[in-house]
Image (spheres, rainbow, N blue to C red):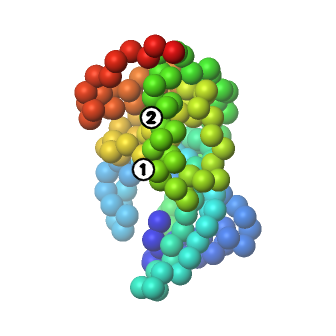
Amino acid sequence: MRIFEVRYLDMISERLRSGGLFGVLLIRSGNETGPTSTYQVGTLARIVDWYQGSDGLLGVTAIGDRRFRLLSSEQRDDGLNVGEVEMLPDQHDVALPQEYRALARILAGVLDDLGKLYDSLERKYDDAGWVAYRFAEILPISPSGKQSCLEQDDPLARLEIVRQVLESVRGPQPADSD
């Protein structure tokens, strides 16, 4: 993220000092600077790196940590939206079925090519949910499509969404023979 608005600079500064998380919600209608309606399910994010760009803007790298549901929200005087959330249950690892193993191999190659951003990420290629979330991050899926993946509680259903997107981009792939 590239940060330049005072409300976000203040929020990021406070989060850097406290080590705290911040919530990210997709805007359903409206825009950043006016009245908005957001989706109710979002992601808590933690800052893992930051830098001052040559253009003076603050660059922030954050990683999604956990899903939440927005219960209520309000806009502060400075324009920052704050709210009360409930944490959604942690999703347990679900073994990657044989039929999706080729996707895990594709993902491994892609993450290796992406370099620094994914270097420190724990790799869980045997977990269906982890594989689906990584693909949802990197594939050219519409924001509403990414939101559908985030809201999906069943990791196998999420993985099927990802497979359909991949097939629409690459065409059907042969069945895995491992």
Residue type, label 1: Leu
The residue carrying pointer 2 sits among few (fewer than 14), some (14 to 19) or many (20 or more) residues within 10 Å by Cα, namely: few
Report the front residue among 70 and 61.
Answer: 61
Name the residue beneath numbered marker 2: 106
Instruction: Specify the label residue 68 is tagged with.
Output: none
Q: Quadrant for residue 141, please give it.
A: top left
Q: Where is residue 89 drawn, in percent x and y? A: 66, 32
The residue carrying pointer 1 sits among few (fewer than 14), some (14 to 19) or many (20 or more) residues within 10 Å by Cα, namely: some
Residue located at (63% from left, 75% from top): 13
Confirm whether residue 132 shows in the render: no
Residue located at (38% from left, 52% from top): 27
Q: Where is residue 10 drawn, in percent x and y? A: 58, 76
Instruction: Specify the label residue 26 is tagged with.
Output: 1
Q: Where is residue 91 drawn, in percent x and y? A: 64, 30
User: Dot 2: what SS?
Assistant: helix
Residue type, label 2: Ile
